[in-house]
């Protein structure tokens, strides 16, 4: 099955593990991905806050480029929930309002582009894996069942809400991710917070509000004795993983819940190497949980980062040694 | 006994007070500035949105209150409220609203209007949006390293020290890079965005 693929900025960098693990499993699952040529950032939730119409035009450029690539498929697939929703929303609103469609196309014409509303189907990776690939095909590839791994499936917001195309029959109580993790052999918790918000960009606007949203999720996962909280969105992963230490500090708690991508677990169950799947990039160490199912993750040697010329001004970085101790279970 | 018409001389009755006339121009303005069909005028003030909102407790006004204030023409209070900035775009309200109001989109509009009018109490939200968008416009891609440093130095200089482990971790784990990625079609993208802004201005 072929899809036009929109990776998005996060998957290219901070969520590289998501992209790497998706690439590792696409062959066994029979998925062919063709990246949108010269795609641009979807604007996350920020561009629309400055200029709603320009925000739609920014997304419209991606849709227009993708429309030029509709060769054998009309489906655009994204792994990031925010990217997915942005693409789906602009398409849907253009379809709903001919006037908006005309305005956006007037803007796109300035760059020599055009998008026909409805020309593409915009879908999220979860939807594709569940409804096109199917549980059976996933199960068939399992060579290393994840027996003994207790996982909390976490969907977050933007895949199920607003779900313009009604891809999910129970948007307030979805089970697709639960089922996928189930066929991998993992012990799946009926996670009551699976649809709650991770806070999005709130970490940059109000720390107390953001950390409380993160705390609720991590706390619930810990209460359910989860080894891992499994995400399908770079923003969710980043918030719950990278800010977990700060959240612990703020609330005087000591949670260590590893936050992984569902594609990483699929890859593990398919017998792929942990390193190929991007394990080791997480802040909260996933190794203790993985070692219990017999998966060893080699300690990744820190990547040599080029020294920026004005590093002192760019980002104060006091010497620190906390990193490892803090993330160990 | 039937009343004679002389008994009901309407002119001699005391006049009823005039009903208040709602100033709907602000509502019109918000609707016009929201791309698509926001359905904001359909709001029946049921409060489902606020009841579903994870940020409601920290908002100065619940979404429902904000919509009542928009209708009442209280533009200044609405644009000064922290409510749109505390919206995390979770879309709970939108799927539960019985009137299918595009609530998160209205929140985006309010943010953009507040930025234009310079009406916000806490600048962290507006600056985040502007810095993020600035990088996207400059490179065609978001630039997390630039965003993190600029935004933090500006708004959280004290907690910057606390941020350093996170920043360093992001770098050593190769989750952040110093160098922005540029798209090829930058010129076209800039032209598209400039035209979109012109159209936005013209519609105001
Ligand atoms: S849920 Fe919808 S109708 Fe009810 S108050 Fe909110 S916006 Fe209005
Ligand atoms: S989308 Fe915004 S306003 Fe609506 S429930 Fe979520 S945080 Fe609240």
Image (spheres, coloured by chain):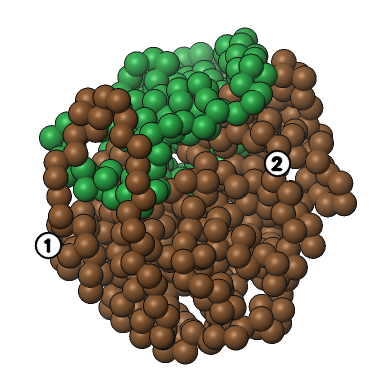
Chain colours: A brown, B green
Looking at the rendering, in which quadrant would you find the N terminus of chain B? top right
Is residue A301 placed above or below A290 in the rendered structure? Answer: above
Q: Is residue A311 left or right of residue A124?
A: left
Residue B72 drawn at (x, y percent): 42, 26
Residue A95 drawn at (x, y percent): 76, 38
User: Does the beta carbon at disc 2 come under 8 Å from ligand 2?
Assistant: no
Residue A92 drawn at (x, y percent): 70, 42
Res A252 label: 1
Residue at position x 51%, y 65% in the image: A277
Looking at the rendering, in which quadrant would you find the C terminus of chain B? top right
Residue at position x 74%, y 34% in the image: A65
Residue at position x 77%, y 24% in the image: A113
Residue B101 visible, this orientation: no
Is residue A144 placed above or below A121 in the rendered structure? Answer: below
Nearer mark to the viewer, of 1 and 2: 2
- Seen from the viewer's position, the closer of residues A161 and B101 is A161
- List the single residue furthest toward the bottom: A147
Q: How many marks?
A: 2
What chain does badge 1 belong to?
Answer: A
- From the image, tell me which residue sits under label 2: A36
Is residue A50 placed above or below A249 in the rendered structure? Answer: above
Residue B152 visible, this orientation: yes
């Amino acid at each position: 099955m072929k899809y036009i693929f929109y990776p998005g900025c996060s998957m290219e960098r901070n969520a590289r593990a998501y992209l790497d693990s998706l690439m590792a499993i696409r062959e066994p699952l029979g998925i062919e991905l063709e990246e949108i040529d010269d795609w641009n950032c979807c604007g996350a939730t920020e561009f629309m806050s400055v200029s709603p119409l320009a925000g739609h035009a920014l997304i419209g450029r991606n849709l227009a480029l993708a429309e030029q690539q509709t060769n054998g498929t009309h489906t655009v697939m994204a792994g990031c929930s925010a990217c997915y929703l942005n693409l789906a929303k602009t398409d849907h609103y253009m379809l709903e309002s001919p006037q908006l469609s005309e305005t956006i196309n007037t803007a796109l014409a300035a760059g020599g582009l055009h998008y026909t509303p409805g020309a593409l189907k915009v879908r999220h990776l979860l939807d594709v894996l569940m409804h096109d690939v199917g549980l059976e095909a996933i199960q068939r590839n399992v060579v290393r069942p994840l027996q003994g791994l207790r996982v909390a499936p976490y969907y977050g917001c933007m895949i199920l809400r607003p779900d313009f195309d009604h891809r999910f029959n129970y948007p307030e109580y979805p089970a697709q991710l639960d089922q996928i993790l189930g066929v991998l052999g993992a012990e799946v918790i009926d996670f009551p917070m699976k649809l709650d918000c991770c806070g999005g960009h709130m970490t940059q606007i109000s720390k107390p509000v953001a950390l409380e949203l993160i705390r609720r999720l991590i706390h619930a996962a810990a209460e359910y004795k989860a080894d891992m909280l499994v995400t399908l969105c770079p923003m969710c992963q980043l918030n719950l993983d990278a800010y977990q230490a700060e959240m612990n500090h703020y609330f005087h708690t000591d949670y260590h819940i590893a936050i992984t991508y569902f594609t990483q677990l699929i890859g593990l169950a398919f017998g792929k190497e942990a390193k190929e799947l991007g394990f080791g990039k997480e802040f909260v160490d996933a190794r203790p949980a993985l070692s219990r199912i017999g998966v060893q993750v080699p300690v990744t040697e820190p990547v040599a980062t080029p020294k920026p010329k004005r590093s002192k001004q760019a980002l104060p970085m006091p010497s620190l040694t906390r990193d490892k101790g803090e993330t160990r279970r | 006994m039937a009343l004679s018409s002389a008994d009901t001389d309407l002119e001699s009755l005391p006049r009823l007070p005039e009903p208040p006339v709602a100033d709907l121009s602000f509502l019109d303005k918000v609707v016009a500035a929201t791309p698509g069909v926001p359905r904001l005028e359909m709001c029946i003030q049921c409060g489902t949105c606020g009841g579903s909102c994870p940020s409601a407790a920290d908002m100065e006004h619940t979404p429902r209150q904000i919509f009542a204030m928009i209708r009442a023409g209280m533009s200044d209070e609405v644009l000064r409220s922290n409510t749109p900035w505390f919206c995390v775009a979770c879309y709970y309200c939108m799927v539960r609203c019985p009137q299918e109001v595009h609530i998160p989109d209205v929140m985006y509009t309010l943010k953009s209007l507040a930025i234009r009018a310079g009406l916000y109490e806490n600048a962290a939200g507006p600056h985040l949006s502007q810095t993020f968008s600035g990088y996207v416009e400059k490179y065609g891609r978001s630039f997390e390293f630039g965003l993190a440093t600029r935004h933090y130095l500006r708004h959280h200089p004290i907690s910057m020290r606390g941020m350093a482990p996170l920043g360093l971790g992001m770098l050593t784990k190769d989750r952040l890079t110093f160098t922005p990625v540029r798209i090829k079609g930058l010129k076209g993208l800039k032209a598209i965005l400039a035209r979109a802004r012109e159209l936005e201005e013209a519609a105001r």
